[in-house]
Amino acid sequence: MSESSPRWHQSRTVQLTIGLLVTAGCLAWAFYEMCREDPPAVVLRQIGSAFASANYLTLIPMLIALAIFYWLKTWRWQMLLRPLGHFSVPSLFGPVMIGFAFNNLLPAHLGEFVRVFVASRDQKLPMPAVLSSVVLERVFDVLAILAFLGLGLSFVPGMDPDVQNQAITVAIVAAAGVLSVVAFVLWTGPFVRLTERILELMPFVPDRLRDKLTGMLESGAAGLSAIKNVRLLLGIVATSLIQWALNGLLVYLSLRAFGIEISPLVACIVLGVVAFGVTVPSSPGYFGVIQLCFLMVLKLFTDDTREVFAASIYYHMAQYIPVTLIGLYYFNKSGLSVREVEREAEHEEETLEELGHAALEHAHESEDREAVPQDDR
C-alpha cells in the first residue's frame, strides 16, 4: 500500500461525511416543507397512504424507458469513441452500467472514473482519451437538459419570474462551459500551445507534471474529435435529446402513479432541476437531493406535497435498484476489484496533490519575497 493510501481514504471519508450531511439537510428541508401545517407523524402516515394507493403498473413502462435510456447512452458513447476505434454497443454497455452503479454506491461521482478505467482496460485505450469522451458526453447532457428546462420555463403559464431568472443564470454558466470545451475541440493545437505557455510562466509546476498535463490534453483531444464529424455530431445530439426526453417521461409517469396530474412541461422543469441538483456533493445515490428538487419545483404547481415526496422516492428507486444490481453484475463479471480502482484513484490524486503542493510552496515563496523589502524599510 502506498504512503498516500491513508490520505486517500481520509479524503473519501471526508467526502462521504459531507455528502451525508448534505443528504440529511435536504431531507430535513423537505420534511420542513411538508410539516408546515401538520405534525411529522401525520405527514409520515400520509406518505404511507400515498404509497398504498399508488398505481404500480406504471413501473412497466418506466423500466422499458429506463432500458432504452441506457441503451441510447451506450450507443452515444460508442459514437463519441468512434475516433478511437469501432466498438460494439454490448462491449461498452457493461462499463456504462458499472459506472452508474458505483455512482450509486460511492461518493464524489467516482463512478465516472470507474467507467473510464474499466473501458480503457477492456478496450485497451488511453485513459485521457476515454475520459475526454465522458467529458464531452456531459456537455451534450447539459445542452439537452437546458433545452428541456428552457422549454418548460418558456411555455408553462404563471411561472415565477425569479425562478426563470435563476434558470437563465444557470444556463449562461453552463453554456460558457460548453463553449470552452468546443473551443478546445475545434482549436486543439492553439489551445494546447496556450496551455503550455501558461504553464511555462509557472515556475512552481515541475517539468514532469507540466509534460503530463499537456500530454493529457493532446491525448484527450482524440476522444473529443467526434464532434468534428457532422454525421456523428447529429447522431450524438439526437440520442442526447431522446435520452433526456425518456428521463422526463420517467418523472411524468412517477407523478401520475401517485395521482398528480401535471403538464409534461412541468416534468421538463423537474427534470432540469433534478439533473443539476445531483451535481451537488451528496451521499452516494443522491438521496435527499432528488426529493428536495421534486418538492421545490412541484410546490409551485400542487399542494399535494406528500404525494410529490412519495413520487420522488418511486422515481428514484425505479432507477437506483435495477441500475445498481445490473452494474454490480457486470462488475463481478469484469474480474476487477474495488482495490484496483482505488489504486488508480490514488495515482490520479497524487498528481493533483503534487500540483497543489507546488502551488502552495510557490505562494509561500512569493509572500517571503514580498516581505523582505518591507523588513528592510
Image (tube, helix red, strand yellow):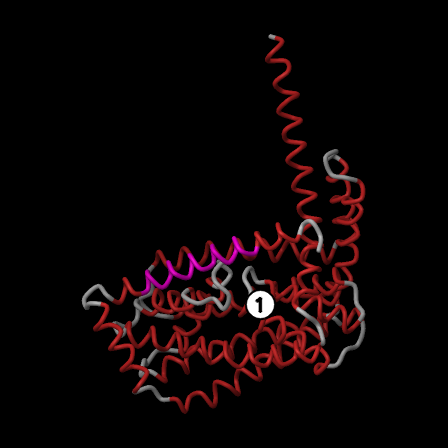
Q: Quick one: quadrant of the C terminus?
A: top right
**Looking at this view, is 278 or 171 the one in front?**
278
| Residue 315 falls inside the magenta stretch | no
Q: Residue at x 65, y 42 (%)?
A: 356
The answer to whether 235 is drawn above or below residue 67 in the figure is: above
Give the labeled residue for mark 1.
141
Q: Residues within 10 Å of mark 1 (few under 14, many from 20)?
A: some
Q: Quadrant of residue 163?
A: bottom left
Horizontal and vertical percent for residue 199? 74, 40
Horizontal and vertical percent for residue 302? 28, 73
Q: Residue at x 25, y 77 (%)?
A: 46
Amino acid bearing label 1: Asp
List the single residue furthest toward the front.
1
List the single residue furthest toward the top.
377
Q: What segment is highlighted magenta in the picture? A: 12-30
| Residue 17 falls inside the magenta stretch | yes
Horizontal and vertical percent for residue 253? 41, 83
Is the stretch drawn in magenta largely helix, strand or loop?
A: helix
What SS does tag 1 mark? helix
Q: Residue at x 44, y 65 (%)?
A: 273
Q: Quadrant of residue 201?
A: top right
Q: Quick one: quadrant of the N terminus?
A: bottom right
Q: Quadrant of residue 177?
A: bottom right
**Looking at this view, is 18 or 8 the one in front?**
8
- What is the number of callouts on the image? 1
Q: Is residue 46 left or right of residue 267?
A: left
Horizontal and vertical percent for residue 347? 71, 54
